[in-house]
Image: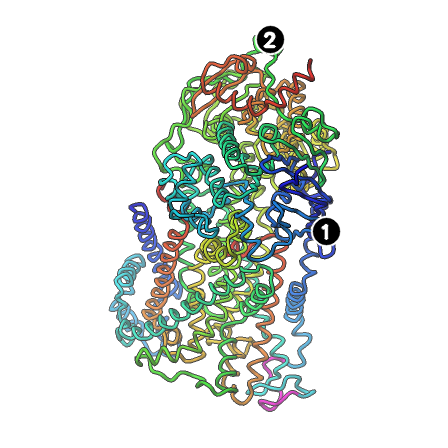
Amino acid sequence: MPQILAMTVRRLVMSFFILSITALIVFLGTEVLPGDALTATIPTEELQFYSADQLAEMRSELGLDRPIPVRFLEVWARLMTFDFGTTIVKHEPVGPRIFHPMINSAILAGVALVVMLALVISLGTLASLKPGGRLDTTISATTLFTYSMPDFVVSNLFVIVFAVWLGLAPAVILAPTNAPKLTILAASILPVLALCVHGVAYQYRLLRAGMVEALNSDYVERARLAGLPTWRISLVHALPSALIPMLNGTASFVAGLLSGSVVVEAVFKYPGAGGELLRALSQREIPTIQAIAFLAALAVVVANLLADLAILALDPRVRTRSQNG
Amino acid sequence: MADIPVSTPLRRSLGWLRSRRLRRALSEPATLMGLILVVAHLLLALLAPLLAPYDTSALVGAPLQHPSWEFLMGTDQIGRDYFSRIIAGGRIALMVSFLGIAIAVVSGTVLGIIAGYIGGRTDEIIMRIVDAMMAIPDLILIAILILALGTGPGALIPVVAVVYTWGVVRVIRAKTISLSTLDFVRSAELRGETRLAVMVREILPNLIGLLGVELAVRVSSAVLRISALSFLGLGISQPTPDWGLMVQEAMGVIFTDPWFLLLPAIMLSSLIIGVNFMVDGLSRAFGITTAELG
Amino acid sequence: MKTPHVDVRNLKLVYKTGPQTELAAIDEVSFSIGKGETLGIVGESGCGKSSLARAFLGYTRPGARIAGGALVVGGVDVFALTGEALRRYRGGRAAMVPQNPLSALTPHRTIGQHMVELIRIHNAAGNISPTQKALDLLAAMELPDPSAIFARYPHQLSGGQRQRVVIAAALVAEPELIVLDEPTTALDKTVETQVLDLVSRLQKRTNTTLIYVSHDLNVVARMCDGVLVMQHGKVLEDGPTKEVFNAPKTEYARTLIAAIPKLRTGTRPEPVRLATAAPILSIRDLDFSYGGKRSRFIPRFFAAPPARQTLKDISLSIAAGSTLGVVGESGSGKSTLASLVAGLVGGNGGRIMFDGKPLSGLAGGRGRDLRRRVQLIFQDPASSLNPQHTVEQIIARPLQVFFGMTRAASRDRVVQLLDELDLDATLLTRSPRQLSGGQQQRVAIARAFACEPDLVLCDEVTSALDVTVQAQVLQQMKRLQREHNTAYLFISHDLPVVAEMSDQMLVLEAGEIRDYADTGTILTNPNSAYTKNLLAAFASATAHSTKRTFQNVS
């Protein structure tokens, strides 16, 4: 399969470019737009205690007096090699600090993703057995409803219902960031459910759109006229094509999932990268912000790459197209 | 005689056709409910200053009072009238989102049509920027930009515009590419129409329905993000009333007065639910698929 | 009289059109077919024939339901079947050959997976393996190298191969009834002939009852013992093929049969005109291949492969006011020829001269006058008319661009143009979606003639239309040509239509000219074997109708 290999390589190169542009956006947003990384880092009320000479000295020490393109190249090289540097004021290394929170967030998002896909695909297939039937319309209406529920509202409702009213779970998670990963996994149940409320709805709506199109296709009609059983038509003939719109939306979906998990983590005090990001934002810790934003983008790009490969596997027409260029 | 019009019942002008589809869409209770919710929210946002019995930031009574005729929804932790704050709580987020998204839809449409119609290297460059912008989760991107530019409406509007342009580019580009394969575009090119004329005269009119839906969907999503940021303490700040912020304040009294959390939550959810049900019904009536909206 | 094999009594099928309203697509239809007979169901789009085709398998499309009547196949009351029994009936006792094999085969499943799945479901393998059975069936369909076909995906096959595959799929369980829904619409005429011959050979061997549903009366006339003519859900004529075709009882059937394009080989008066007129278009040694240069009119994924020769050594000329017909099957390069002359693609070798001036490159690079004088009419008016513009805007645009007319001035001219095409001025404010296919194409023709062109390139302009509408449009085009002294480059796969329209004809195959002469000469005395074959394919297809024409003439 040399052509598939060629396509994969092409996509890898493309992903590298996209990540470079992402690094540029993060750099512009954190170091150029605020005017100056140093004055952005030091809280306004403390700024008066520094003399102009002191500031200039710190600037040159940090390399902030060099031209913007040079500084960008440096940031770019650091991010691409996963060397996230040290914080500006306290000179703490960023990498070790965000390591555990990143893993914890990856657990949260990963578990949520698996749960969502399982739910979405089984719901979609069930609904497609009788399009327009009661099950189909109920699921559609419910997902449109949950699709509209803000993440932080859902999370808080969960806290009210499960912690306040039922007393089934603690209102907030008390595990430290470096707690054993099994403890983290156990703690992730409510946050995962909260993420699923919106995520399942988002994915389901795309899957259903694909299902509707596939079920209205000539090949599904042919399969019905040839006497194939309904479940087989849904699962074997319609589902693979129906997954494609959903897979095409992977980048937006994963980005949305990560946005949502920042909020959900904050509500449940989950020891993840979301909390670390919020802390970094409030303390204006630029290297940490850069690192987390870049790693989030990396996750989105990798997910999208995997989705592209899945589409290649599902649709032979795309494979043939790749032979032509 | 044998040449029967394909769509026999549709015999009048375009405007009539549209209102017919509109009427059919609104005959669905869910769509109608959505529209009513949206209109009610818009009216409330516009008229809040007239309807509010008290100033939203004035301390008018004892803290945490229960609802009474004096304070319809009671008072919050520091004694402000909760009703006045609730009805005004969507104003800033809605206004900022609406203006920001309006800019995003315009710029996204321009870039999307150019990328889709001109194609080639122009398309390649625009789309790689789109991919990169959309790879950063929007909440993080907004947070970074807010950190740089501040949280006043003057800063939030451009932030929303910058963050949401790229999704619009993607949707419009995809539609433009499928329109560009149609022969009426070839026909215009053969007439010697300029590229600008083809894009404006031939392609743009076919995007109107999609643009309306984009505007509505993205305004609701921007409202969600801004509220989420306010909830996290990064967005709209005190003493401005904002539902996200109010939910965050209410978390402190969640065990004693969950009521304070539920009210703003219901307000925000009903706005988003309204928009989504309305859009869902209308886009079905106008033949816009979920997949097209990405 | 023995009991019929298929018996339809008072069948009524309705579509839901609103919460309370229904529309009858099939209205009180009764007829019967004997075992091993072949029935043709003909009619134009919207007459209910494809709903009827599906009813034979106890299937209605979403939104439709059987509102009354009975359908019995081999003693089985089809509408009484439910669940498992209905599922086994479909594909087991009655099978359907779908209209468009490319879209009717699941894109992500190989041909082998399709076949084996059906064989397993219907327990049709007997004492051999399902794979072997599938290979045998593919071989019986005279497909070259069945094991290679077995491993391919649908999009990797040619149109003819796909058609054979779906027929093989219908034969899996040796059904007693096969319904063929527009079985050859997507095929070239020469391939169609092969496929139809194969089907009738198989039928003779198995004594299967066949139902052909088609808008193509030639296919029906050739293949069927009996014919059913349908209009608006009702059966107008029902009888033996010869009777119906030779002596139609209803006015509609008469119009329908008269509208069939026929190959007339009689003498033609036109050539006189050719000698005197100067050529408006002349082409010398035209060469063209896609891929040499990136073109944004070709989907990007086709642009990379090594240059494929599409047109080779094409030389031709068209006299002012005359018609050159170009006939060719899919892939012959005939549409590329029109695209080159129109300026949709550029970068050809050789020379194109228009009225003594060179014509090359993309339309945008040509002068305004040249753009005006050469017009292209597209195949599909649903695609060539902007759905967001009104008829008036569509026709007025060239008037504004080429003649600088104001809105008020263009209005009168648009009305006049509509009138020339027998379209009413009330259409001015309509959107194309509110027009019928025939009206749409006439608006497209009016738009071309608004430019007062000297040469109109017509690329399959009537292929999407019903035959009676096609006949009208062709008449109007001829009249316009006479009145405006416009030359046509008339391109179609449909040889009788081209012959009808043309003074001279050119036969293209694989990008090369096979024959180029007066229409009369081509029809009676073609040079190449390819043209002879093509003529034979069309002649056998029109055997019935041609015979009838001569009877009427004498």
For the residue labelled by badge 1, is the local secondary structure a helix, a strand or a loop?
strand
What colour scheme has been applied to the protein in the rendered image?
A: rainbow
Given residues C336 and A32, the one toward you in this image is C336
For the residue labelled by badge 2, is the local secondary structure a helix, a strand or a loop?
helix
Task: Provide the residue span drawn in magenta.
Answer: B55-67
Q: Residue C22 carries which label?
A: 1
Residue A265: x %, y % from top left: 42, 76
Q: Decide if residue B10 is in sight here.
A: no
Magenta stretch holds residue B8: no
Q: Decide if residue C116 is in sight here.
A: yes
Residue A110: x %, y % from top left: 38, 69
Q: Residues within 10 Å of mark 2 (few under 14, many from 20)?
A: few
Q: In this view, does C502 lie to the left or right of C304?
A: right
Camera-near label (2 vs 1) is: 1
Tell me which label, 2 or 1, sits earlier in the chain.
1
Judge whether C372 appears above or below A304 on screen.
Answer: above
Q: Is residue B48 left or right of residue C329?
A: right
Name which quarter of the figure residue B136 lies in: bottom left
Q: Do labels 2 and 1 share a chain?
A: yes
